[in-house]
Every structure is written in C-alpha cells, then in structure tokens.
Amino acid sequence: MTARIVLATHNTKKVGELRAILAAAGLVLPDGGLVTSGEVGAPEPVEDGVTFAENALIKARAVCAATGLPAVADDSGLAVDVLGGAPGIFSARWAGKHGDDLANLELLLGQLGDVRPEHRQAGFVCAAALVTPDGREEVRTGEMRGVLETAPRGTNGFGYDPILAPDEAAPGAGGRLRTAAELDPEEKNAISHRGKAFRALAPVILEVLRG
C-alpha cells in the first residue's frame, strides 16, 4: 500500500473532515497516511481556473509534481441562485481578502438584504480531484442545497456554514431550520457537498493506495 497521500491544503480542519468522511466510506488511513501540502513543504499554486474542477486539479497536480506522491485536492464554494451562481470560485475572497470569513459573510448578507425568503436558495458545491504520479486524474463533485439565513448561527464548521440551512438537515427544536454550523460533524459530513464529493472519490483513492 502507498505509504502516504497528500491533501493539497494548509487548512488542518479539512484534514480531520476528510479523514472522517473517508472512514465513513470504509477507508481508514493509518497514522501518517494522510499529510497536508503544508506538512511536506509543497508550494501553493495560483488557482486561476474558472471552475471548481479546474482549480481542484491545479492544486492536486502541483502537489503531486512537488512531492511525487498521489495528491488529493478540492475546491468548493457557495453558489447563490439570485446572484447567478456567485460568489462561486471567488467564495473565499468575496470581500477582497482571502479567507476572511467574517467579512465575506457580512458582504454577502448585505448584498442579499432585500431578497425575500423564497428567493434565498443557494448551494455549496465541491469538486474533489485525485492526481497520481503516473498521470491519472479523477474528479468527483458534490452539492449541498439549502436556503440562506439573514444572520449567522452556529459555531461549528467554517466559511459560509453559519448562514446556509441545508435542505437535507433535520429541523431543530420547534421545527426551526438549522444552519450547517449548527450540525454536529457527523451529521454535516453525511449531507455536505464535500462529503458527497469525497465519498464518490473514496473508491478511487483506495484503489490507488492499494496499488
């Protein structure tokens, strides 16, 4: 079995999330079997693709080339119907600075301030890519649809999780919709865009690890 597979991210939260998703799909990686690009010193490439799939492949290709190991990457974001699919691939830097979750949330909520509840549909989209040293490339996608709340709720997750109430999530107390940030990790992974994409990719990852 391949000793390691590299996840093209510097976000340690994603590592734990991916491990849990793969374990639920029957793929339990040994200690040290999954490392991040940051841990192995791989550079972060310029994500200049125009789709989630393109950006995921750009990241996976760069890490695979830098390490000589199979690499997995994902690119994801929030697509708001009334905004024509925006912020989309610009989700992490919607307010101008990459990774400023609070500023991104505040800007998006301001842009949707006058949008009626029946028009606040949106979805998280994820493309997960696997690239191997022998040139194999695989991409799988997943989506989590829901409605956008008017104010953030919940402390779990990251990004836009506090404002999207997933359609597939069971209601909370009193029938109130819960946001993705109010779900426990197992519940979120079962319905999340990233969970769906990586579960679809898991059999291919297992095949590569087994050689």
Image (tube, helix red, strand yellow):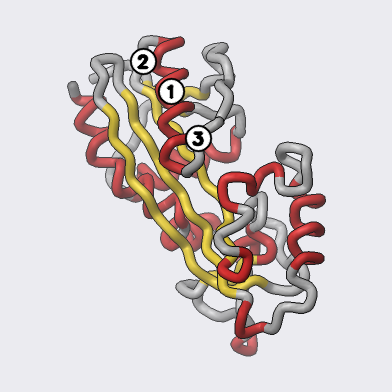
Q: Secondary structure at mark 3?
A: loop
Q: Quadrant of the N terminus?
A: top left
* The disc label shown at residue 69, or none: 2
Q: Between residue 125 and residue 25, name the one nearer to us.
A: 125
Residue shown at 51%/60% (left/top)? Answer: 188
Residue neighbourhood size for the residue with mark 3, other residues' Cα within 10 Å, grouped as few (<14), some (14–19), many (≥20): few
Report the amino acid beneath label 1: Val
Residue under the point 69% across and 73% down: 149
Residue 158 visible in the displayed image: yes
Residue 49 image label: 3
Q: Are marks 3 and 2 in contact (CB under 8 Å)?
A: no
Vertical position of residue 22 compared to residue 66: above or below: below
Q: Looking at numbered disc 2 in the image, what kind of residue is underneath it?
A: Leu
- In percent of width and height, residue 197 lies at 37, 49
Q: Which residue is mark 1?
A: 6
For the residues labelled 3 and 1, the Cα–Cα distance comes to 21 Å
Separation of residues labelled 1 and 2 (CA atoms): 7 Å
